[in-house]
Image: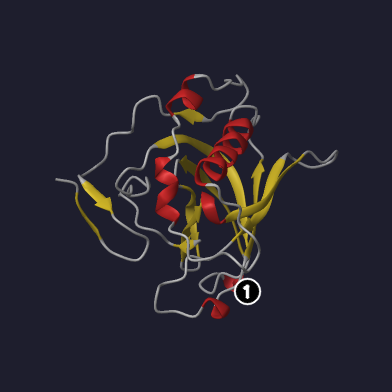
Amino acid sequence: MAENPQLFGNGMPVPFHGEMFVLARDGVEFHVDKIPSAPGGHAKTKGTIYLSNIRMVFVAAKPVGNFFAFDMPLLYVHGEKFNQPIFHCNNISGFVEPVVPESQNRALYSTHTFKILFKEGGCGTFVPLFLNLITSVRRYNQFEAQPATVPRVDPMQAAQTPVDDMMRHAYVDPHDPTKIFLQQPAPESQLRRRNYHGPADNAY
């Protein structure tokens, strides 16, 4: 994970080189623990989830303390589960490992627990796409994240996973407000990121 990734003024995450955004889903509630900048270390807020071939990014509608966005590389997510409780809303829960800078000790960073709650509308488009994409990323990269033992795999290698066909054949649930990007959203600038810890630069 990476807290507060770079965003454009409209809230869209600044893309990496080779990144393709698959969808955006408004009206979700997001919970994540072990966030130093959030009150009590736990962030719970509403906003939008962006899903790409590299990562899933939650962008809060309103900041919680200094927390306004959370970036989860797909190769670092594990234990994901789609939950359909009888008396509560459908949700996806799971764990995500931290993106540790090269110079830092992995032991200083903890695994995060996250939950995405679908409180507004259905989730019949988002959930299958998310589960299929994360399965494809692992299969294509022959990688399975494990708690606290994730090697320093480059989260950017997920960009090689082919997603075009998956997007074209996605089931569209009329009750799910998920927006599928059949064309990439027009960026505010040509800024692109090369890695998780460096600044964005111009694509050209």
Single out the residue that lies furthest toward the right: 86
Label 1 crowding class (10 Å Cα cut-off): few <14, some 14-19, many 20+? few
Q: Using residue 154 as the reference point, say whether residue 176 is left or right of it.
A: right
Q: Return the residue found at the far left.
A: 204
Left or right for 108, reference 22: right
Number of callouts in the render? 1
Query: 34 above or below 183?
Result: below
Most extreme residue toward the front is: 142
Query: Height in image: 97 above or below 104?
Result: above
User: The residue tagged with tag 1: helix, strand or loop?
Assistant: helix
Amino acid type of the residue that numbered disc 1 sits on in the rendered structure = Gly
Q: Considering depth in this image, is 149 or 118 the residue closer to the camera?
A: 149
Question: Residue drawn at (51%, 61%), measured in percent from left and top?
Answer: 1
> Residue 44, how many percent across, how many down?
61, 58
Q: Quadrant of residue 127?
A: top right
- The answer to which image quadrant residue 45 occupies is bottom right
Specify how the rendered protein is coloured: secondary structure
Percent of width and height locating residue 178: 53, 30
Of 46 and 185, the residue lying toward us: 185
Q: At 35% across and 66% down in the image, what residue appears?
A: 197
Residue that label 1 marks? 40
Relative to the observer, which residue lies in front, 145 or 191?
A: 145
- Name the image quarter holding the C terminus: top left
The image position of residue 183, as x and y in percent, is 34, 26
Apparent side of residue 41 relative to residue 137 in the rendered image (left or right): right
Kindly identify the residue that appears in the image at 48 percent across and 29 percent down: 179
Estimate the x, y position of residue 202 in percent, counting from the top left: 17, 51
